[in-house]
Image: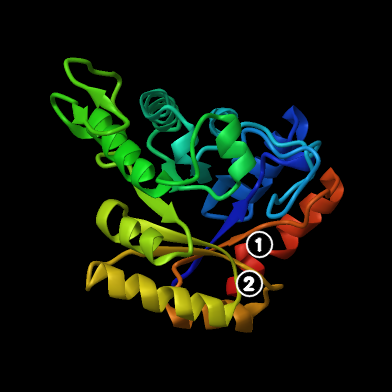
């Protein structure tokens, strides 16, 4: 079966401290996980309101800073943002940070981006909910220019620069990018701007529907598909996702686990157990 297993949210709860993050990263690498995906919310609504995924006091380390830490505690595993809310980040600063992670990790970076959905968070960071998709596309083009172009430049509605540069460039040329989001607009952005697509908390029927829309948008262009499943995994379920065309399953632990419980979750969902 040609399918990889990744681990989501190693920067939350039991992973949101020095000991837990280092332990879980090393364990995941030893067990054959192909990737670690850091969760991203800069701030959370207080008190919690729908559709916020966490209570405001939930421990959640910064997605990019966590990748830098995980770089120092791993050797082979891919390091991914899963997914960074791109409109609420300065694209030039983020491009610099992510390029640094790619250099320090020896070319193991995978950039997951998403337009975001949590209005109180976006508003607190000065980003209107309206137009966030177009802003995401423009920010990503600006970041790619800084990573790839001999003379980086971007002249858009939200980003305007030229006559500047940033080194060192990423080790990877190009840096792989996956686009998150379940809308047709997100599928179009994935097809136009990214190398892959990431679906969050999807069952088999929902995955099939999403992939139908994604393939229509891609119009024959191959895209790598990563999905966080919305159900407990066994070998038959993993095979069913693979049969739909999923390339990677990114398992996410229940919220609030202490370190021992998180270690057991990582062991129970290890590639050796699920893939045979």
Residue at (66%, 62%) from the top-left corner? 270
Callout 2 crowding tier (Cα within 10 Å): few <14, some 14–19, many ≥20: some
Left or right side of 92 for 79: right
| Secondary element at tag 2 | helix
Quadrant of res 200: bottom right
Q: Is residue 221 visible?
A: yes
Q: How is the image coloured?
A: rainbow
Residue at (30%, 40%) from the top-left corner? 138
When the figure is inspected, residue 129 is found, relative to residue 196, above or below; the finding is above
Callout 1 crowding tier (Cα within 10 Å): few <14, some 14–19, many ≥20: many
Residue beneath disc 1: 270
When the figure is inspected, residue 235 is found, relative to residue 256, above or below; the finding is below
Residue beneath disc 2: 274
When the figure is inspected, residue 23 is found, relative to residue 115, above or below; the finding is above
The outermost residue toward the left is 150
Residue 170's x, y, as percent? Answer: 32, 31
213 or 150, which lies in front? 213
Quadrant of res 58: top right
């Amino acid at each position: 079966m040609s399918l990889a297993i990744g681990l989501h949210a190693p920067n939350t709860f039991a992973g949101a401290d020095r000991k837990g993050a280092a332990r879980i990263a090393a364990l995941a690498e030893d067990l054959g996980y192909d990737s670690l995906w850091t969760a991203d919310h800069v701030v959370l609504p207080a008190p919690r309101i729908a559709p916020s995924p966490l209570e405001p006091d939930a421990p959640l380390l910064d997605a990019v800073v966590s990748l830098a830490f995980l770089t120092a505690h791993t050797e082979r595993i891919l390091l991914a943002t899963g997914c960074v809310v791109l409109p609420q980040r300065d694209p030039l600063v983020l491009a610099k940070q992510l390029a640094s992670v790619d250099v320090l990790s020896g070319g193991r970076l995978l950039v997951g981006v998403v337009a975001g959905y949590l209005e109180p968070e976006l508003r607190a960071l000065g980003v209107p909910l309206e137009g966030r998709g177009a802003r995401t596309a423009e920010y990503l083009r600006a970041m790619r220019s800084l990573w790839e172009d001999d003379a980086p430049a971007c002249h858009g509605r939200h980003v305007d620069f030229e006559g500047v540069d940033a080194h060192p460039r990423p080790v990877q040329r190009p840096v792989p990018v996956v686009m998150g989001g379940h809308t047709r607009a997100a599928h179009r952005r994935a097809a136009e701007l990214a190398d892959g697509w990431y679906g969050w908390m999807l069952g088999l029927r929902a995955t099939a529907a999403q992939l139908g829309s994604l393939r229509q948008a891609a119009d024959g262009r191959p895209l790598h598909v990563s999905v966080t499943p919305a159900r407990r995994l066994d070998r038959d379920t993993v095979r069913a996702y693979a049969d739909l065309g999923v390339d990677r399953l990114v398992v996410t632990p229940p919220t609030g686990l202490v370190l021992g419980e998180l270690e057991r979750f990582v062991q129970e969902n290890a590639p050796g157990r699920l893939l045979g």
